Image (spheres, rainbow, N blue to C red):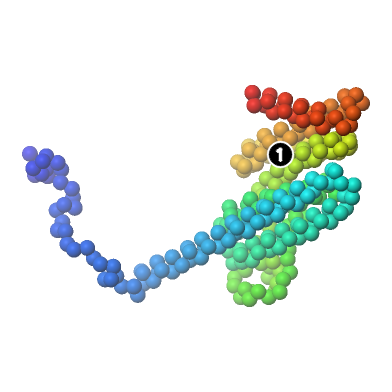
Amino acid sequence: MSNKEGSGGFRKRKHDSFPHGPRREGKDVNASSPVMLAFKSFQQELDARHDKYERLVKLSRDITVESKRVIFLLHRITSTPDMEEILTESEIKLDGVRQKILQVAQELLGEEMHQFHRAITTGLQEYVEAVSFQHFIRTRSLISMEEINKQLVFTTEDSGKENKTPSSDAHDKEFGTWRLRITPVDYLLGVADLTGELMRMCINSVGNGDIDTPFEVSQFLRQVYDGFSFIGNTGPYEVSKKLYTLKQSLAKVENACYALKVRGSEIPKHMLADVFSVKTEMIDQEEGIS
């Protein structure tokens, strides 16, 4: 039998040949050593970064909730005669959302935005969706990313932070000017979500006797779908996932337009919404089967 094997026939572990001395107590560690001081600094830096991340997640959640409320408000346009009143109220609510985005910009002072992008992307996408929805109702066109970013430039009083190293994404060189730039991915995902809201607005409009909005929405959605088709699978993974939902929304709107064009004169206006809801359910079932 080999000398490396014990009486039981098992190979001895390497560290078994070393003497087992008493375990060192924590009090023997020199807390003032350079290594301990360095790791203490690392701990404080990581704790501060984690706390900042959690604050940004909370702000993003607030932005998402407030943006959804703006979208719900804008859907009342189809059943309210005074459209300007709804648009004015939505603008006031969007100003409140931008104040939350200002807090995000202040949190990102001196930081690299992309390190915290995951914490705020959901809120920014929902904000893009709300702003683009409002812009479409006003102009029947798509708001550009540059126009959205222009709205996210804020001028505030001195907050005592101007001596820190500013980040190009959060703080301008001029005193008291803050900005947050929407990334292309956030913009694309927000626009993709917009198509679902336009589909709902189309169906609601038909139910209220408006037969012009579905055709306007249909033409707009075709243009958006063509643009996303050019990106295809070459873009971010999230964008390619949204493409299928966009196609579903376009199919439902085109189905509504088809029914209006072919059977619009046969069906009373107050019954059109019921016809479209039945056809929409049939489309969903066919897609589920396929």
Residue shown at 68% from the left, 63% from the top: 102
Label 1: which residue?
A: 228
Q: Quick one: 92 or 43, which is closer to the camera?
A: 92
Expressed as whole percent of the image width and height from the top left, the position of residue 236 reads 62, 43
Work out whether residue 243 can be spotted: yes
Q: Is residue 88 above or below residue 156?
A: above
Which residue corresponds to the image point at 70% horizontal and 43% vertical from the top-left? 193
**The N terminus, quarter of image:** top left
Question: Residue 273: x and y, percent?
Answer: 82, 32
Which quadrant of the rendered structure holds the C terminus? top right
Residue 222 falls left or right of residue 32: right
Mark 1 nearby-residue class (10 Å; few <14, some 14–19, many ≥20): many
Q: Quadrant of residue 245?
A: top right
Q: Nearer the viewer, residue 94 or 245?
A: 94
Could you tell me residue 208's position as x and y percent? 86, 38
The amino acid type found where label 1 is placed reads: Phe
Pick out the residue farthest to the right: 265
In this rendering, the answer to whether 127 lies above or below 284 is: below
**Residue 70 x/y as whole percent:** 75, 52
Q: Is residue 229 visible?
A: no
Side (left or right) of 32 relative to 282: left
Left/right placement of residue 55 relative to residue 149 reads left
Q: Residue at x 68, y 60 (%)?
A: 101
> Residue shown at 55%/62% (left/top)?
52
